[in-house]
Amino acid sequence: MQPLTEMLVLLAAAVLLVTLARRLGLPTAVPYLAVGLACGPHALGVVSGSAAVALLAELGVAFLLFALGLDVSLPRMIAMRREVFGLGAAQVGATTLVFALLGRLAGIAWPAAIVAGGAVAMSSTAILLHQLRERAELNRTHGRLAFSMLLFQDLAFVPLLALASALGPGTNHFDLRAALLAALGGALAIAAVLAAGRWLLRPLFHEIAHSRLRELFTLAALLVVIAAAWVSRLAHLSAGLGAFLAGMMLAETEYRHQLEAVLRPFRDILLGVFFVSVGMLLDVRQLAGEAGIVLALLALIVVLKAAIAALVTRPFAASRFKALRTGIVIAIGGEFGVALGSVALADRVLPERFGQPLLLALVLSMVLSPLLLNHNKRIARLLLRERGPPPRTAFERESAATGAIGGRAHVILCGFGRVGQNVARVLEAQGFEYIALDLDPARIAAARQAGDPVIYGDSSDEQILALAGLATATAVVITFADPATALGILRTVRAERPDVPVLVRTQDDSRLKELEAAGATDVVPETFEASLMLVSHVLMLLRVPVSRVVRTVGEIRDHRYSVLRNIVRRAGAPALDESHEFREEVKSVVVPPGAWAVGRTLGDVRARGVQVTFTGVRRHGILGRNPAESTQLRDGDVVVLYGTPEELERTEAVLLAG
């Protein structure tokens, strides 16, 4: 089949199954795995496992880890060093040793048994991080500990691959010189990526940002990811490790958010290709022929690996429950394990009768990973025979979080962007309660972590408005700039509450009459209000009495800004540049165990010269607003900051690494 036809079949199958999976509420990894399984060389044979597919899959993992590096930063890595090099080394070492002993009992020579044990110790970085991010569990205790293990696994892959490659075909003699050379090459590659990230990337992006060409910025971002992956592969490291280190270096710059935004589409598509490639590895015919052996190996790997990980995690976790959750999450196989097994099998280091079922069991554990990850809490409670709080739907969780406010007088904010957040802060400062509605998941997650009463949902939906307490609301503020969106929300609100005051924000007055006819109590055009503010300031500078200024502004508003509409625009005038808006924003920083700030006060952090406002500290789910400088920080605290992006990054670095 021609490559174009193969691509068309893959895209059609992916679109169909991903849409169906979304309808059923399944993780996005599941439909991609199903596409690879159905269309791969071991099933319908529509697509062969070509080198191009493997390359795209590897790039998908690299893009994912680059994005993760943008979230981690070097100070956070320094703060997590105990978990990465302590817990990670314990998990890889213990798992490798246990499975190597089992392999030795099965008659495999020691070097080959160690390679097999190392292959089992690896977990899928791409699948775990993707699923944990989707479930918003990456910053939870089990997510953080699992991430630490994954980082060390990426590092441990180098010596294990060197061992597998150093064992000659059909022999079990270890070449120490080859292994040392491979390890040295890996160390030099890591040093090169770190050096380039610190001394080359920041000036490069500074120059590109000044060019103000979006396509050039995107090209530079792609160049950085692929170059870092290339350097890693050149040294026989995983491509994802180099990309992660490059992202970690750029996390300390002011370009991290823009980099994540421009690379997100590439990351999501290529990650889908990775899941398709994993599905292609599964040979259904071999599974049917050796089902008993493969399933026994699968159960042994998952159960034993989870138990080992839970045992080594216990000293790092606050409870048995969290340790067991971490073990369940890390229990699946990984792409690096499959790579190690494939090398050992190709060089006849591992016997065919043992190597093939092992590879099949590892791939099958990756395919079944969504089942384990989605129910890790339930499985942990079942094994420990503990009773937790009854599971609640997202609707019930949001009802519990906002029900108290929704039952009394409050303001509903439709939209929680910059304007909505500014309105919320003023309402809060004046003692008024509010509930906000928005459809941006990232913004919702950040706002909830900061303690804001925000609900994910469409503001024009009757049920969502009812959840926000429309029946008891004293006012509704629509902050969306799009008049069509505002009209839809306005009509829904008026159908339920004809009496409630509704304030609508627009960019201009182009649809003012339509909004008023739909029931808007007042319409606030941004451009006119900005002009009024300038007018009032100018009049004050000209020493016009305050009463006259207020009266003038009031008259202009009463006449619906008619005096401000006589604008002569220069021909060919460019659009307004919105890049110079006020840049302050809110950010939440989780203080992990081992961070510099643990045991220190906010005053100690301030003494490091940071220029931000500490707006809150959240501890055990309780948010303290405007904390005192004497507030002492503990591990697990969420510190809510307000300031410019540069100062927010600097403050995070101080909190984590001093």
Image (cartoon, rainbow, N blue to C red):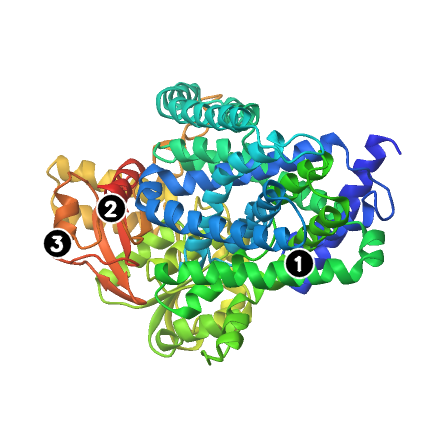
**Percent x, y of residue 31:** 71, 53
Badge 2, how many Cα within 10 Å: few under 14, some, many 20+? many
Foreground of the two, 537 or 340? 340
Residue 551 vs 311, above or below: the answer is: above
Which label sits in the foreground, 2 or 1? 2
- Please name the amino acid that badge 1 sits on: Arg
**Percent x, y of residue 190:** 44, 28
List the residue tagged with mark 3. 629
Q: Quadrant of the C terminus?
A: top left
Badge 1, how many Cα within 10 Å: few under 14, some, many 20+? few
Q: Residue drawn 51% across and 55% down?
A: 132
Foreground of the two, 603 or 186? 186
Residue 309 vs 179, above or below: the answer is: below
- Please name the amino acid that badge 3 sits on: Glu
List the residue tagged with mark 1. 22
Q: Residue drawn 60% across and 38% down?
A: 60
Residue 58 vs 305, above or below: the answer is: above
Q: Quadrant of residue 253?
A: top left
List the residue tagged with mark 2. 655
Q: How many marks?
A: 3
The kind of secondary structure element at disc 1 is helix
Gap in angstroms between the C-alphas marked 3 and 1: 46 Å
| Image-based side of 199 in relation to 31, left or right | left
The kind of secondary structure element at disc 2 is helix
Which label sits in the foreground, 2 or 3? 2
- Please name the amino acid that badge 2 sits on: Leu
Gap in angstroms between the C-alphas marked 2 and 3: 14 Å
Residue 22 shows up from this direction: yes
**Percent x, y of residue 65:** 51, 39
**Percent x, y of residue 35:** 76, 49
The mark that comes first in sequence, 3 or 1, is: 1
